[in-house]
Amino acid sequence: MRELYTPNHSAVHRIDARVKVIFTLAFIVFLNLTPSGAWPAYILFFTWMFSLSLSSRLGIAFVLKRSLLALPFVLAALPLVFTGPAPLGQIPVLNTPSLTYSVVGFYRFASIAIKAWVSVMAAVLLAATTRFPDLLTAFSQLKVPALFLTIIGLMWRYLFVISDEVTRMLIARTSRSATAPGSNRSGGSLFWRARVTGGMAGSLFLRSIERSDRVYAAMLSRGYTGQPAAQKTTRLQKKDLLALAAGVILLVLLWLLGVITGG
Amino acid sequence: MEPVIEISNLSFSYPDGKQALEGINLLVQPGEKIALVGANGAGKSTLLYHLNGIFTGSGMIRVNQLELNKNNLPRVRAMVGLVFQNPDDQLFSPTVYEDVAYGPTYQGLDPHTVREKVALALKAVHMEDYAQRNPYHLSSGEKKKIAIATVLSMQPQILAFDEPTAGLDPRARRELIDLLLELQQTMIIATHDMNMVEQLTPRTILLNHGKIVADGPSLDILRNDRLLMTNGLI
Amino acid sequence: MLFSPINPMHIPDGFLSVLLSIVLWVISVVLIGIALRKTGQTIGERQVPLMGVLAAAIFAGQMLNFSVTGGTSGHLLGAAIAAILLGPWPAVLVMTSVVAVQALLFQDGGILALGANLFNMAIIGPFVAYALFTLLMKLFKKQTWGLFVAGFVAAWSSIFIASLACALQLALSGTSPANIAVPAMGAIHALIGIGEGLITIGALAFIFAARKDLLKADANKPARNIGVVVGGLLISLVLVVLSPLASSHPDGLEWVAEKHGFIEAAREAFYNIVPDYSMPGISNPALATIVAGILGAVIVFGVAYGIARAEKRPSAQDDAQR
Ligand SMILES: Nc1ncnc2c1ncn2[C@@H]1O[C@H](COP(=O)(O)OP(=O)(O)OP(=O)(O)O)[C@@H](O)[C@H]1O
Ligand SMILES: [Mg+2]
């Protein structure tokens, strides 16, 4: 498991994390509010994210590739193409009989796929240009409860340690998953394989529970009292606020464009 | 005699670009006990992982004349038993018995044969009485022996160990070395424990930055202070 | 090892209507708020590291898999085992952490859709699992196998019921017709749920052998969480009844129409303020698309050019900032 954050000195990296969080959320909300078939608006939403990705210097290929990850889910929307309302179009399949599809349904489907794709781009950009502690600070300044942020902070602290542990367990299992000489079958029964995997999970959880005892002791020895450390809140700078406001206004305009041009 | 392991010109880089092995050439004869030494990060574990195809670098590896490739990986894995440094990563069943039975059960052997193999493996590590115990609560030394039993039950000709004595108290270490002396299989042992090398493995291979810098009788290498010094072992 | 987020229950953005997303966000936030309050009251600070580390373990544990057939594999989601080990409210917090971090940092599930994903996986999951587990444990009191039956049923249901909720949400959003989404999602997850159930049995067997005490802890005081038990059962009942109903009336979900009505109204209002003829071209979709395309290309080119220029110059500004 690898962290997405990629250190860089780009302008996008330097923006206040709060601004990035709010803007990303607003961007996704307005993009999703845009009705289906609003191609001009989609193009401009995409342009915007594409430009931001360029200026983040993450490598545009990285952002585009990573954002395709959500696409398998479009299968869920595929039926729209065939069950949508009239007018119906025909795709000739081996001349006859032909496949009937709904034009509106197809537009809806394409719109969903585009929205999903551009939304993930926005999320990738946020995660790849913001350090996790900065995100936590931003959330705390945005009044997310401290208890919750403490839990997430601890989770992040141990996530990579524990996922290395899982990787080692999987390797150890693989190295014992062999075929006997002169035999062709192997693998055991499905139920047995599932149960073994469950044993690995059980062992992982127990080790983690016991690890949490040590973590607790270590936290106590460093003066943990159950109260999360107070975060000092810095006000957003004026230029950040202005940029955020300008961004949201532009989003509203884009959304309006979508409302006019969409179906 | 034909070598049991034949490695020629093996090189390997991790996905992040770190070159961990470079031009490794190695012949191992049946029954040999070999120590693999080198400073932290020298590439010992990486080399061991190649022996049963967990990593695949460029170059050629043959185990029992069988060239390691995707198709015969499952067969090679039955010939090479890999014992990991942390037994907790290797033990995941509610009982010792089930853990030792994993390999044979996966091979699709019938229950009777599985039982026999488990009994033999537990006997080999002198842990017959532990079959119904839960591995989670055993001592480090006991866990280590069970981990060895889990690979012995597949009757591999080659055993590969990653730092077997790390974290054991003196007595558990003593017992483990005695056990390894008893076992007849070909052994490759990655270790920092020079005393064990002296007692257990007549041949030593010294790695540095992914390359073999020395390969010869353990006693010669252990006495060569300059060699050990330049390779970060004293 | 890279985490590969192809999980059929993490809904990405784009698939849910904004209204529904917001409603589910509000419901989830309220319930998570209750979980925070309850957890803060009833358990010591000692539990905080436990929840954090266990959240990490569940996240990482989702990489544990077993091969099923033809390249597919079974995974663990973990809501049930969390509810069994920790009790319902801490489990809600643990699963919330897992699902939220997956969305925010690994793009597994959307950000606007996070409310829905939290509702399905961090609330329905633990609630349903806890309710059924508690109920069955009462039924099979003292039998060891009862633990495993209860664990299996709890785990299977947590997946299956959550997937019904997910399917209904997609249908309500007009993304996937209910008569296709509900049976498809339900069927896939009835299978995935078996994997979850079997892995949960394996995990319980391991924990039962090694640390029996952990499984006793919460079973003694179900009375305290009677609300969760009732809630979990109600959720299951409603979803099980509602789903077939919805899928037999695929067009009966008026929300979609309502949303269209809203967009029409917005459009009307807009044209009242800015008359159509004052923006030639915008009302012509094809032309507007072409103009947007050209504009987009120009913007991207401009940004790229600007960056290239900035890169050529020695980056004195960057150094000063460091
Ligand atoms: N998963 C990985 N990704 C990238 N680099 C790795 C990975 N694992 C190991 N390395 C690097 O490869 C080199 C060899 O590592 P290896 O674990 O084989 O060393 P070792 O000799 O076993 O060391 P030690 O005595 O510490 O166990 C090291 O430089 C290490 O940093
Ligand atoms: Mg090593």
Image: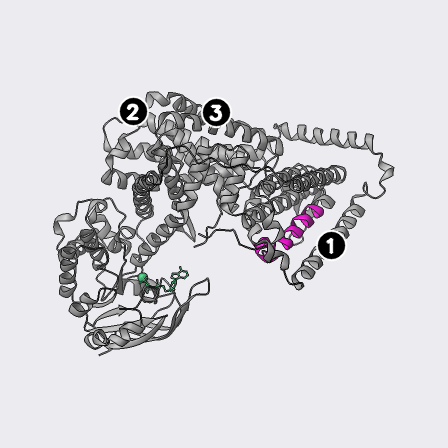
> Tag 1's secondary structure?
helix
Q: Which residue is mark 1?
A: C297
Q: Residue at x 18, y 65 (%)?
A: B196
**Residue C108 in view, yes or no:** no
Is the residue at mark 2 in contact range of ligand 1, meaning its CB lies under 8 Å from it?
Answer: no
Q: Quadrant of residue C35?
A: top left
Question: Residue A252: percent from the left, percent from the top?
Answer: 71, 37
Compared to C31, does A194 lie above or below?
below
Q: Which mark is residue C227?
A: none
Amino acid type of the residue tagged 1 in the rendering: Ala
Residue C78 lies, in percent from the top left, at 39, 39
- Depth order, front residue of B182/A247: A247
- Looking at the picture, tell me which residue is in the foreground, A105 or B79: B79
**Residue C238: assigned label:** 3
Q: Chain of mark 1?
A: C
Amino acid marked by disc 2: Lys
Report helix, strand or loop for mark 2.
helix
Q: Which quadrant, please, contains the C terminus of chain C?
A: bottom right
Magenta residues, dominant SS class: helix
User: Label 2 belongs to which residue?
Assistant: C138
Is A59 colored magenta in this rendering? yes
Q: Are marks 3 and 2 on the same chain?
A: yes
